[in-house]
Image: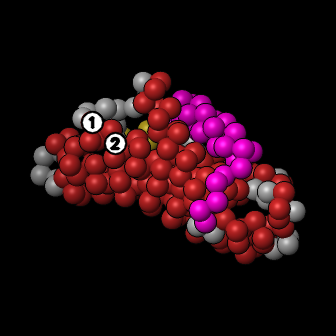
Amino acid sequence: MNKALPLQAKIEIAIFAALALLLDLLPSIKIATAVSISFSMVPIFIMCFRWGVKGGALSGLLWGLLQLATGTAYILTALQTFIEYIVAFAFIGFGGVFSQSIKTNLANNNRSKAFVLIVLSLVIGSFARYFWHFIAGIIFWGSYAPKGMSALWYSFSMNGISMVGSLIACLVILSLLIPSASRMIVTKSHS
């Protein structure tokens, strides 16, 4: 668990974080001002599956830092920025918790079990990210709630819709990619 990531992982993490940023720049589905649905987490989830929690967390962290560096982040305060672009994006890495099992099942051609683990990973990584957006939503964005709606409910509903929509978008893309290109997930040690 404390092993350093190999150079190949570090290179892939940087490339896939940049790819996530590029995908994030594409038009997304906007249901409301605070609700955006996109599949830009797909590259980060691929890093989660290939390199586990550490690789996914580093890739997510780098994606968040790239958003800050390119000016695409919504910044209110230093604490809000830290929570939503450093912590939340790094927490996508928890989607790598089943990395070894996913790779083993794909390598052994057990696609149905791998698919179940991938879905669980997507749920875990998405929930982990949006939990922090939910917290930030209560603290920093709650004043934008419609009259009569609590900051807690506003944050829960807006971030919940974004999470579920983005989770479904990522699931659709990955369910199309992985069956035809499982080598994208399975590293050399599992082939």
Q: Bounds of the magenta span?
A: 1-29
As drawn, the residue found furthest toward the left would be 148
The residue lying toward the viewer, choosing from 11 and 56, is 11
As drawn, the residue found furthest toward the front would be 3
- Residue 191 at what x, y percent from top left? 87, 62
Residue at image coords 47%, 39%: 64
Query: What's the amino acid at mark 1?
Result: Ala
As drawn, the residue found furthest toward the top would be 70
Query: What's the amino acid at mark 2?
Result: Phe
> Circle 1 — which element?
helix
The residue lying toward the viewer, choosing from 12 and 109, is 12
- Residue 63 at what x, y percent from top left? 52, 39
- Residue 89 at what x, y percent from top left? 46, 47
Labels 2 & 1 near each other (Cβ < 8 A): yes
Crowd rating for badge 2 (residues with CA inside 10 Å; few <14, some 14–19, many 20+): some
Question: Left or right: where does residue 156 sit relative to residue 53?
Answer: left
Question: Left or right: where does residue 14 sit relative to residue 132?
Answer: right
The residue lying toward the viewer, choosing from 145 and 130, is 130
Crowd rating for badge 1 (residues with CA inside 10 Å; few <14, some 14–19, many 20+): few
What numbered label is drawn on residue 28? none
Residue 27, above or below 106: above
53 falls in the magenta region: no
Q: Kindly identify which residue carries mark 1.
A: 78
> Circle 2 — which element?
helix
Q: CA distance from mark 2 to mark 1?
A: 6 Å
Residue at image coords 33%, 38%: 81
| The N terminus sits in image quarter | bottom right
Q: Is residue 84 visible?
A: yes
Residue at image coords 28%, 41%: 80
Prevailing SS of the magenta stretch: helix
Q: Kindly identify which residue carries mark 2.
A: 82
Q: Is residue 178 visible?
A: no
